[in-house]
Amino acid sequence: MEWIKQPWPWYIAGPLIGLIVPALLIAGNKAFGISSALRHICAACIPANISFFKYDWRKESWNLFFVGGITIGAFITITFLSTNEPIDLNPQTIADLKAMGLTSFDELLPEDIFNWVNVGRPVGLVFFVLGGFLVGFGTRYAGGCTSGHAIMGLSTFQWPSLVATCCFMAGGFLVTHLAIPYLLKLL
């Protein structure tokens, strides 16, 4: 049982994620992606006359089971498989984050940023509201999220997915190196 509690090496986890693509294609020509699930949920729950939500969401209901499986898996992991050990970060990453003023490295989300005090502060609005808006806008503008484009789109040789993945990566590098160091000074 201990093996499942440990992080799996990339050469195991990566191919397992990649095998989702042919499995979904064989199972019924389904496209992997998580961001479209929100659209399906809204189409199922919002009885408004909005053209974006007027389609047969039932044909894509398998995606809702996928989201349900993720939710159940997360619950099982947190409840039964999590350990109290701190996150195993690269020492150079810890040194870089300390140089930017972060002090907490025990959780996936640094408590220096993600805490209730910062929710009401301007820097919290930047991280939580503006950051969330930009992720949602980018996903909508690109026609999908990183999982849909980088895993499904690239494996099926789709040119728009290559462009979207390059833009996601470039945006991540730019924000990490140009915006985050300045934003962390505001904490």
Image: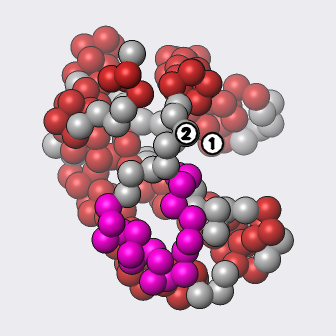
- Horizontal and vertical percent for residue 127? 63, 70
| Quadrant of the rendering where the C terminus is positioned | bottom right
Residue 81 covered by magenta stretch: no
User: Residue, x 69% and y 66% (percent of image)?
Assistant: 129
User: Residue, x 64% and y 69% (percent of image)?
Assistant: 112
Amino acid type, mark 2: Asn
- Horizontal and vertical percent for residue 17? 29, 31
* Residue indicated by mark 2: 84
Q: Secondary structure at mark 1?
A: helix
Q: Secondary structure at mark 2?
A: loop
Neighbourhood count class around disc 1 (C-alpha, 10 Å): few under 14, some 14–19, many 20 upward: few
Residue 101 covered by magenta stretch: yes
**Position above or below: 183 against 127:** below
Report the span colored magenta: 90-108
Neighbourhood count class around disc 2 (C-alpha, 10 Å): few under 14, some 14–19, many 20 upward: few
Earlier residue among tags 1 and 2: 1
**Position above or below: 88 against 129:** above
In the visual, does 33 lie left or right of 135? left
Camera-nearest label, 1 or 2: 2
- Spatial CA span between label 1 and label 2: 44 Å
Q: What is the quadrant of residue 68 in the picture? A: top right
* Residue indicated by mark 1: 52
Q: What is the quadrant of residue 3 in the picture? A: top left
From the viewer's side, name the closer residue of 83 and 140: 83
Q: Residue 141: which disc?
A: none
**Position above or below: 107 against 40:** below
| Quadrant of the rendering where the N terminus is positioned | top left
User: Residue, x 47% and y 77% (percent of image)?
Assistant: 98
User: Is residue 74 in view?
Assistant: no
From the viewer's side, name the closer residue of 183 and 34: 183
